[in-house]
Image: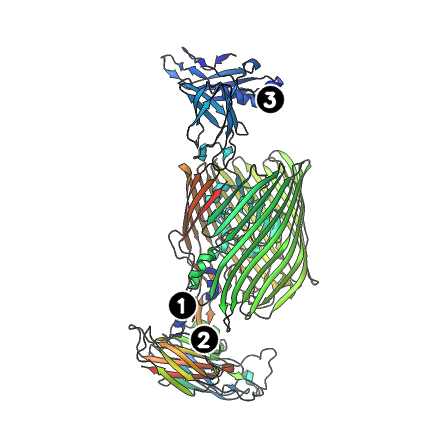
Amino acid sequence: MRVAACLLLLVGCAMGPNEETVIDELRIVSAVAEPPEVAPGGAYDLTVTVADPVGEGFELVVFTCPPAELPPGVTLDLPPGALDAPCAVERPVVDELGQAVVPSVGALPVPQWMVACAPGACDVDAARERDLRDPIEWLRSLPLDGVTAAARQVRVVSPPAEPALVNPEITEVGPIRGLAEAGPDDPATLSFVVPGARTAFGRATVGGFARPQFDVASDGSVTLEWYGPRARDPQEGFLYVVFGGEDGATALFQLAVP
Amino acid sequence: MWWSPAFAVEPAPPALVEEVAPIWPDGALQSGATATVDLLLSIDGNGTVTAATVVASGGEAFDRAAVQAARSFRFTPATDGSGRPVPVSIVWRTVFEPARAPVVAVEGQVKSAGTRELVADFDLVFTQGEARRVAITGPDGAFAVAGLAPGTWTVTPDEPGWAADPVPVEVVEGKVVQLVLRPTLVRPWEVGSDEVSETVEVVGQAVAAEVTERTLTQEEARYLPGTNGDVVKVVQNLPGVARPPLGIGQLIIRGTAPEDSAYYLDGAPIPLVFHFAGFSTVLNGDAIEEIAFLPGNYGVRYGRTLGGVVDLKTEQDLPARTNGYVSVDTFQTTAFAEQRLSPNTALTLSGRRSYADTFLNPILNAASDATIRVPRYFDLQVRLLGRTARGGALDTLFLLSDDRFRVLGEDADQNQTVQIGLSTTFSRVRMAWTEPLGDGWRHELVVGAGPDRQSFDFEDGVAYEDPFTVSVRDELLQPAPTSGLGLGGRLGVDTLVGRFRYAYEIPGFGEPEGADVLRFLPGVYAEGTARLGPVVLVPGLRADGAFVGADHTAAALDPRLAARLELGTTVLKASAGGYSQFPTVRQVVQVPDLRAQRSWQLSTGLEQRITPALRLEVVGFANRLTDLVSGREDAFRFFSGPPPVGPLDTGAYANDGVGEIYGLESFLRLQTERTAALVSATVSRSTRTDRPGDDRELFDYDQPVVLTALVSHELPKRWRLGARVRYSSGNPYTPVVNRFEDLDSRTFLPVFGAVDSARLPAFWSIDTRIDHDWVYRNWTLTAYLDLQNATNRQNVEVMSWTYDYAEEDPVAGIPLLPAFGFRGEW
């Protein structure tokens, strides 16, 4: 939309990539499925990471609702009654790093929805089955502030691919240069080697990355530039680097700063 | 000769002191013709003849000679009973006697400085000491004066509104001095109205051609603020026209989309009327004689559209002389030239090229990784106009228009590629033949032919529409009389035929589409006009068909009726009728059984001439739309404005939509010799229901209130000032009430609220303009400064959002935009 508007206006539009890397409110950063690809009805663990820069705390809800019917042309060997099951709702415990592991069974080719709510922002208990089956409609009833939502669809294939899809593996971290000295004008660099990754997405609750995403070289190496915070901004927080691989394969690097 | 006092108050009538013999008209002396002319002379308190009016003619040429001679007479002042000089009028008889024919001493012409136009009825005063002679130019601007004593005479113009330095003339006995004078028109409003500039008419709401007219002079249109001198852009200020977002220049007429309105060039359809972003019209304004703006309830001459009609009618008079201009302004350079090739033919050449890109590109690209190419456009017109012996015309016009906009980038190998490209090109050969047939009937044949191409390139995708169209309009017309009883009529054929190729292959916009089909759109119409004294009735019927490819056939029958009651300075009018618009080619290729979209329109109103200079028009209208084509809002299409956002109807095309539009338009216009002012107000509501059972929603461009006031005032010494104030309600938009991030694509997606349930802030703008002319011997230089959005108000044109949809990030329109330019005219 913004691009379209810029096209029409022709002047005065400067994209701001840096701001996209800055997390200044509750945000679901990543959802890593392990394994990243399962057979219909299969099991996997979904690790959800939530950034909470304000530090007020939050409640995380993860729910999955079976579709009324499979999309045209999609045939899967589903367990009996898979499409008639009620929505699976999880309210996992979140650790001090903002991470929660949600074990999932009975995988279906539908998105899993994650909603993180600041205290008092949404009444999860009041969310009816009908709301959960239509997350968009439920989101319409929730406030914009204090609520963050995300969707993730784990790859469900039948029969399983050969070789099996795996998440990227962070084999080497570093060198990380200038982290302590980095400022709004002096970036630090974070280097990684992550075989299987294609793109690295930088996010931060303190400071910000130079770009929202960085291309990963074919040997898995990538270097991200991170700018430190301005004096008036928060000085403590987390840096997140989400590595995206093929077909939704994901890995997360999380670093506390300073 | 004799005289008799018409003012016979005692004690003393004026007595003739000096009489000047009249000059004989060319050839009259040799042919032996004679004449007698009676004049009414106005004599002031000094005994000077200030005016001479013919009361008994001896023929036009003799009258003119008699008047000129009498204006040089000198009398003793008439006096009243107390001996005080008083002005009087007397009747004077001039008898042309060959024996008294004087010898011409000075002859010549008067040409307007700058334009070189010959000036008729222009008074010149020759003085030498106490001696005084007056010369008056004839229709050809020529003058002659006789009876001047040898020596130096001083020639001074004596004509209101004109200025020139006195010119010394050395008169030698036995010789005729040749003289060309070039006075400057400095106060045009003091000149008789017949000498004011050429007129361009904007004809509005004409249920029949002669029912309602809104007339603006070309000079007014050129100098109105906010138009950059473009006469067609004046239409944007008229009632019924909503303000387009981002100043894109498209016309949103009576609550319909820009693509629902049609544009014509002398009755032949053209795909667009404005260049990109509405900077300029695709046809040079100096080639336009009349702009017919028909917001609705128009006659059967026009069809296949639910919205309004703009018909640009080219100048039909041959130029009196070779003329032209070169205009250079902030955005573009324009050149125009007219050349008379023979007594009955003339050639017109015109071209325009924008160059905002040359200075905006470096500015934009300094802050971007991409290479942006600001829109550039050009147009070209070549026209050959010939008048036939019977008073008709044979007119051939070639028109080419080209608009392009690109964003360039580099691929992995650092080769420059087009990331985004948008272009609109069309050309037309338009041939028009008009001929009177006798008994008041007139025949008009207009054939237009040419290709269009609209294309969009976006990274790995491309979309284009590539029609070739031949249009034929053949019409017989007899206007109804302007008073009394009488009938008129109109019979016509309005047909389009051609090939239509298109492809839409833009990733993210559904499956690729494409076709190459023939289309044939025949249309016939008939209209009668009955005048019954003050009542005019105009019933009409139009039938249209559509044949696209092998599968699609549709038809439409549109009856229409207009009525008009003329009561002195008040005119009441009403009209009702059916209007049809066929689905687009891509729609019928996908769903061949689509029908024509329909609109039933009703309007009524009045025109009131409050004073000779002040007119008011009020019109109420209501339109009911049915069979509107809904669906596939997710498919790519060429938008004339911002693309739709919010929940999209992705179902198949169907005639499921309905709509309602109603409103009230008022138009107050002041036209004096020095001042042109318009106040235009429109109050309206436009809604749509896309599918049965859906909620009724606001139309995307629904603007409940649109107000425009503008004034242009002419100052002495060829200065002009103008200002325009505009207000319009903001367009509706669909708000974002929440959002979520798709972690697979790492993009935020919006959760929209109710469709069009929010509205952008209202638009306010003040535009000002100042012009000045410098008049030289053979040409005129005009400079202007046009300040658009003079208060630099940040008007919200389009709603946008931050990347995560957490906040609204409105896109503001054009800030304070100074546009200046020069125009040299000869």
Name the spot of residue B687 as percent of width and height, x first: 52, 58
Q: Based on the displayed image, in which of its 4 quarters is residue A193 positioned? A: bottom left
The amino acid at mark 2 is Glu
Residue type of the residue flagged with mark 1: Glu
> Contact (CB < 8 A) between labels 2 and 1?
no
- Give the x, y percent position of residue A152: 48, 80
Q: Is residue A4 above or below residue B335?
A: below
Q: Label 3: which residue?
A: B27
Packing grade of label 1 (10 A; few <14, some 14-19, many >=20) is some
Which element type, helix, strand or loop, lies under badge 3?
Answer: loop
Which label's residue is closer to the chain start, 2 or 1? 2
Residue indicated by mark 1: B807
* Mark 2 secondary-structure assignment: strand
Q: Is residue B553 left or right of residue B132?
A: right
Q: Which mark is residue B411?
A: none
Res. B297 in view: no
Observer-nearest of B461 and B261: B461
Give whichever of B280, B371 is nearer the camera.
Answer: B371
> In the rendered structure, the residue with mark 3 lies on which chain?
B
Q: Check disc 2 and report the residue beneath it.
A: B741
In the image, farthest residue toward the top: B11
Q: Is residue B446 left or right of residue A97?
A: right
Give B180 or B794, whichever is nearer the viewer. Answer: B180
Tell me which corner region of the image, top left, top right, bottom left or bottom right, holds residue B159.
Answer: top left
